Every structure is written in structure tokens, then in C-alpha cells.
Amino acid sequence: MGPPMTLSVDLFFSFRSPYSYIALPRATRMAGDYDVNVNLRAVYPLAVRVPGFFKRANPQFARYVVLDARRVAEHENIPFRFPRPDPIVQDMTTLDVAEHQPYIHRLTRLAAAAQAEGRALPLAYAIGRVLWDGSVSGWNEGDHLAKAATEAGFDLAAMDAAVSADPDRYERIIADNEQAHAASGHWGVPTFVFENEPFFGQDRVDLLIWRMKSRGLTRRN
């Protein structure tokens, strides 16, 4: 018998989703503990992907997410605060989403650039903490993102330059992620997909590991 085969799981992720952020420590731990590649595939948030989504949603939807995400983060001991500024430019009174979305486009394309190198999970985790852990206001200013990128082994200026030079290349990666996400059997993030089976939510990691163990998942030495 040869060495055990490294399994592979996709993680569909959005930088505006609190649960996507909350899933990152577990996904990172799973990738460290087990012989599995976690391919983080960033998609645009519902606010951008589905125009009018929040206007059609039950008004209790957003309020519940705010309450629950804080509670889950506290339970998991994950530092948590909603990002300042919001990565989506949206009037939270009228729920109108702006046409111009500089923050989410930049963040999602950076993740696509890291995905092209097969290392999107560490980048998303480093940047996710800058947005969500409450230590930074104005994550889009100064050198906060640059430091996070460096921590994940990337050069932010070089990535921004590559994206500016050929934005369509990275938009194609994102569009491909969104198609694969739609085909997976779920519409929300975070969704893990293993062998075409979707596992939606940061609270499905244990179930995912159980399923992968039935396919030969082994612990790293």
C-alpha cells in the first residue's frame, strides 16, 4: 500500500459573512490536524450576488444574524466585531446596495489571487482577522491589510498590482467559484464541499470530518 491519499475539500467563503470568518479557525485547524487540502474559494456576498436580497429577506434575518454571530463567536472564544467599515457599501436603513463596491471587489480579488497560488486559506484568515476581530477600525487604511498579507506569506502591493493589471483574470476565478458554489447544492456561505456533498455552516466541520474519515481521512504525523 502506498501512502494515504491527501483529501481535498472546497470552502466557499465571503469576506462579509460573519459565519465565514468564524469558520476560519476551525478550517485552519482541520487543515493542520488532518491530511486534507482546504481550497478556499471566495465568492461575492449575497448583497452583491443577488441584488435586492436584503429587501426581500424577512426583516428579522439581519437582526438574528447579528445576535447569533456574536453569540457563536463568544462561545468559540473567537474575537469578534462587525467590520469598520462594512466591506459592502450599503445603506442599512433603506438596504440599498451601492453600485460602486471598492472594498469587497478588492478583498475578493485578493483571495482569488491567493487561490491561483493554492494558498487562499491563510490569506483569508489573516485578512479576516483584520476585518472582524475588533482590533482595527479603518481596516482599509494604513498598513493593516499589508501586514496581514505578509503574515500569510504574500506581498500586498504585488498582489494589488497584479489584480489591477488584469482584473478580468481574477473575476473569472471568482465567477468560476460562484458557479461551482451554485452547483454544490447550497447558496450560503460558508459551505464546505467534499466529493460533491455540501456542508453548510461553520457548525458542520465535525460532520465534514466524520464524512471524510469514512473516505480514508488520516491525521497528519
Image (tube, grey):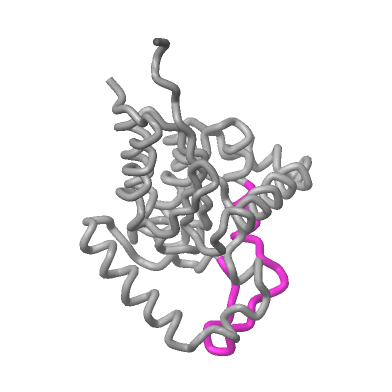
Where residue 166 sits in the image (x, y, percent)? 78, 42
Quarter location, residue 57? bottom right
| Drawn side of residue 64 relative to residue 98, left or right | left
Q: 196 or 92: which is nearer to us?
A: 196
Residue at 69% of width from left, 44% of height from top?
173
50 on left or right of 121: right
- 26 in relation to 86, above or below: above
Q: Quadrant of the C terminus?
A: top left
Q: In this picture, which residue range is highlighted in magenta?
A: 88-109
Please name the predominant secondary structure of the magenta segment in the image. loop
Where's residue 24, x and y in %?
39, 48
Does the magenta run of residues contain 39? Answer: no
Relative vertical location of residue 86 with respect to residue 11 in this rendering, above or below:
below
The residue lying toward the viewer, choosing from 162 and 220, is: 220
Residue 6, placed above or below residue 185: above
Residue that sits furthest to the top in the current view = 1
Query: In the image, residue 181 lies at what x, y percent?
Result: 60, 54
**Residue at left offset 38%, top offset 38%:** 212
Q: Is residue 95 magenta?
A: yes
| Residue drawn at point x = 31 percent, y = 24 percent | 220
Quarter holding the N terminus is top left
Total number of numbered labels? Answer: 0
Q: Position of residue 62 (x, y in %)?
A: 45, 80
Q: Residue at x 51, y 53 (%)?
A: 13
Instruction: Judge left or right: residue 119 versus residue 214.
Output: right
